[in-house]
Amino acid sequence: MKSNNCLRLWFVVATCLLLNLNTTSASTIGKKFVVGLNVTNYDGTNRGIKPGDTVYIEPGHRDRLRLYNIHGDSLNYVVFINNGGLVEISTNTFYFGFQVMNCSYFRLTGTGSISLTYGIKIGHTPIGASGLTLEGQSTNYEVDHIESCNSGFAGICANPKPDCNENFNRPYFTRMNTVFHDNYVHNTYGEAFYIGHSYYTGYTITCDSVKKTVYPAEIHGLQVYNNVVDSSGWDGIQVGCATIGCEIYGNKISNYGVQNTKCQNYGILLNPGTGGNCHNNLIVNGTCTGINVLGTGGNKVYNNIIVNPGHAMNDSMVTNAFGIFCDDRSTIVGSSFYFLNNTIISPKGDGIRIYSDLSKQNMICNNIILNPGSYGTYGKWVDPNKSYVFYYPNVDVTISNNYFSNTISSGLDYSNPDEVYNYCKNLPIIDKGIDISNYDITTDFIQNSRIINGISDIGAFEYPDSTMQRQNSKSIKFISKDLSGKLNINNEKEERIKKVSIYKLSGQLIYTSTTGNEEITVSSNNKFSKGIYLVCVATENEEYRSKISICF
């Protein structure tokens, strides 16, 4: 039985929870500049913009906008922000909607209006044109609270191509510390996110009539998190060349690959040259594989929920859509792939398929795989378990402590993490996983602790032990105040509340704060829709979690 080192109480409190997420993005140390509504090209060098300055973008509709040659420094980013209203960009003629060219140490954010979640919107670009592009030697930046939709190519594109002058080529240029979070990208012709170049291993271009092999720049320090993607024409999130410090997590991706273009219709594509971690993503209802891993090795793919990959295809005979796929497109010899604690439901083909001969000591453990479409199709001479995990004999892989079933209950909405949680808790998965403490996986899909007696449950969720007596916390209380629209969190032990975090059940972090007070109040600006959220409170000695129902 698990010991209850981390007190966890689950109950639903009906409260009209009002949260104020908007924080001032503009700098208080530098000068203020304004990009007027009629301006289409804004050169930072000519304007005299320096580190710590703020560039306000006038709200209203404009045909296109290019910002270029603007540079902050590592301590003082330049902030590009909407100025109190919606900046809306759409074009029928140009090859981008919003372009940032040759800029560094900046933040592009749509948090400039308290009433808008996404204060900058790129609403339309023609075929072949991306919505937001980050080009040239742009590096060290953060992009958040942007909406990009109805784009003629990618919604957000950041993949500078190698050139004959080698300005953007490896090893002469490396993009550093780039972050994309809390963006909404939908109804794109191409990828929703296209980050990093696809041809890490190089390709040939012609320079002065001579063919030359060029190599795209690497990305060191990439984070893609808390983004919402819906109805991408091609891949939901495609990342390439992110060799060091890559994290892709907390994203919700639905209805991906609607164009059903071969090899361009994955939920998440880890293109060659990509390492790092891909975790806590919700990926539902696409035309092909949920997570396609073509990376360097060392990749950890864990705590993901993948539902119905491939079932958006009309051809019932096509089964080459898997929950997770992996091969040797850029594998470093002797490296390892780790597929741990994922929940994969109703893939069109196999649950997990791995073709990596170059890697060693791969791990496929603690996964739930339900109702693979290929089950029973390989013939009587093939082990039917190949439908859950398919691999060739020369693949060096440990497969253990997974839960497989070729049936699921009908009538449930498995795209809803709450229903997945409730369904899987009745499966024989509690305390059945391997110890994952050596893999630096400390929490599950909704931030429950995995570190309980060194034993993990199977799948994306960690559950309280079924025989454990659930107890109310004696020190931490949630006080619902429906009339005032506030959620008070009171700690009666008078221990310092270290941190409060609020998550969607999709795993997306939507609010976080730290305070030294024994009692904190979280108030609202109507940023939230109706639904259930997870509130996590940490003190010096206790961690407390509760589901909260928002009713407004």
Image (cartoon, rainbow, N blue to C red):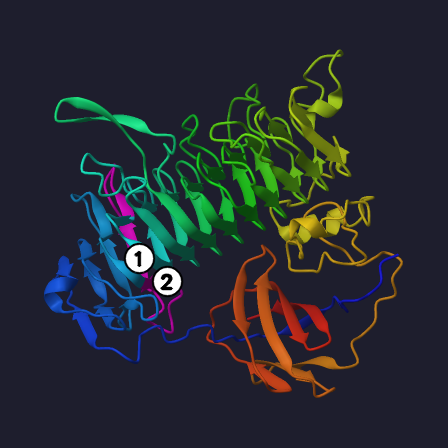
Range covered by the magenta-colored residues:
107-131
Q: What secondary structure is marked by label 2?
A: loop
Residue 323 included in the magenta stretch of the image: no
Dominant secondary structure (helix, strand or loop) of the stretch shown in magenta: loop
Q: Is residue 96 left or right of residue 508?
A: left
Q: Residue at x 54, y 39 (%)?
A: 285
Amino acid type shown at disc 2: Tyr
Residue 129 included in the magenta stretch of the image: yes
Q: Are marks 2 and 1 in contact (CB under 8 Å)?
A: yes
Between 369 and 195, which is closer to the camera in this rendering? 195
Report which residue position mark 1 lands on: 121
**How many numbered dots are placed on residues in this image?**
2
Which residue is most to the left? Answer: 46
Q: Quadrant of the C terminus?
A: bottom right
Residue 169: image location, x then y, percent: 28, 39
Report which residue position mark 2 lands on: 118
Q: Is residue 30 above or below residue 361?
A: below
Q: Residue at x 64, y 58 (%)?
A: 446
Q: Residue at x 31, y 71 (%)?
A: 76
